[in-house]
Amino acid sequence: MDSISLIRPDDLHLHLRDGDAMRCVVEDTARQFARAIIMPNLKPPVTTVRQAEAYRERILSCLSESSDFQPLMTLYLTDNTAISEIKQIAENEHVHAIKYYPAGATTNSDHGVTDIEKVYPLFEYMADLSIPLLIHGEVTDPEIDIFDREKVFIEQTLLPLINRFENLRVVLEHITTSDAVAFVQNGPETLAATITAHHLIQNRNALFENGIRPHNYCLPVLKRESHRQALLDIVASGHPRFFLGSDSAPHAREAKESACGCAGVYSAHSAIELYASVFEELGVLDKFEAFASFNGADFYGLARNTGKITLEKVEWVIPESFAFADSEIVPFLAGEKCNWKLKTV
Ligand code: NCD
Ligand code: ZN
């Protein structure tokens, strides 16, 4: 097969940042995707509908005139989120979900929830109003091995949550383990998961290939090969509750190449192409469109997109870097070959 066409896809988990940094990355996503769920972990975080509306306007102002890309906004859940915000979301057409970060779990999560039971009353409203809860599923307990944090989160936090709030729609974001795959697969219809391209392509060896590789460092951290295989198996199965969320998370080169480098992989520049390579290698290109363009929209209750994109089987080399405000970003798989290319119209 030397070209594939699919309904325009959606990226159900994306970090765009703000200001000049956002201006440098937003077109990468808008070129490929019709819509994206925009993460709210700015500094300070997006915690109110009003802030989300203002952020949305800033995103739209960075897009070219011809772009019809739609940012789907989210709020950042804190210990102090008011019930009135939940009610406002239900009446707002631009805000689609609430993101739960355990405090301190990842980049810009200091305002996250310190104890999930504190926000349980909000979940009642969210369930009633059918507002999805998006979860960064890692415990923050420093006693827990970093490679086990997703598994322990599922046991300690997610299982009780799912059992208690039967009608709450939950997306377990950027899953990395066979435990998460099994939990979502065997879970209720109200539970779904996003999967990144980098977790499908790399295992944890990529962190230490001939030396430490900060540009492959993200959270949840890459896992061992058997976990990657479980992710591949579930996407190859075509299960409808697993869908595309790139978790593209740009950081300036110097913030990554540092004695204490930030977590986050920038994959937006070639996200759909990288996913296409994965599906091709698995021999399941027939499952690609549902994963990229249908499953997420269906779970969120959004209309499926109508336009199409085409990818061509063309080998090209991913650039070594891109401009990023007054610095640069090193993209995922910089300098390596990619064998699918989005056809520009
Ligand atoms: C994200 C970021 O940089 O904002 N980093 C990451 O490693 N994925 C935050 C997140 O989604 O955890
Ligand atoms: Zn993320």
Image: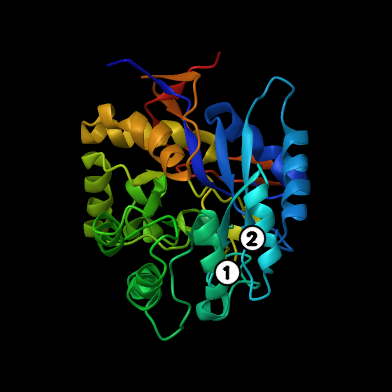
* Disc 1 secondary structure class: helix
Q: Which residue is mark 1?
A: 122
Q: Quadrant of the C terminus?
A: top right
Q: Quadrant of residue 221?
A: bottom left
Residue occupying image coordinates x 39% and y 25%: 340
* Disc 2 secondary structure class: helix
Total residue callouts: 2
The residues tagged by marks 2 and 1 sit, at their Cα atoms, a distance apart of: 7 Å
Residue occupying image coordinates x 64% and y 71%: 78
Residue lying furthest front: 128
Q: Quadrant of residue 111?
A: bottom right
User: On the rendered structure, is 81 left or right of 257?
Assistant: right
Q: Which residue is mark 2?
A: 86
The answer to whether 6 is drawn above or below residue 99 in the figure is above
Residue lying furthest bottom: 143
Task: Find residue 322 and report its horizontal and vertical position in percent.
Answer: 63, 38
Q: Which mark is residue 235?
A: none
Q: Earlier in the sequence, mark 2 or mark 1?
A: 2
Task: Find residue 256 and report its horizontal and vertical position in percent.
Answer: 58, 59
User: On the rendered structure, is 22 left or right of 308?
Assistant: right
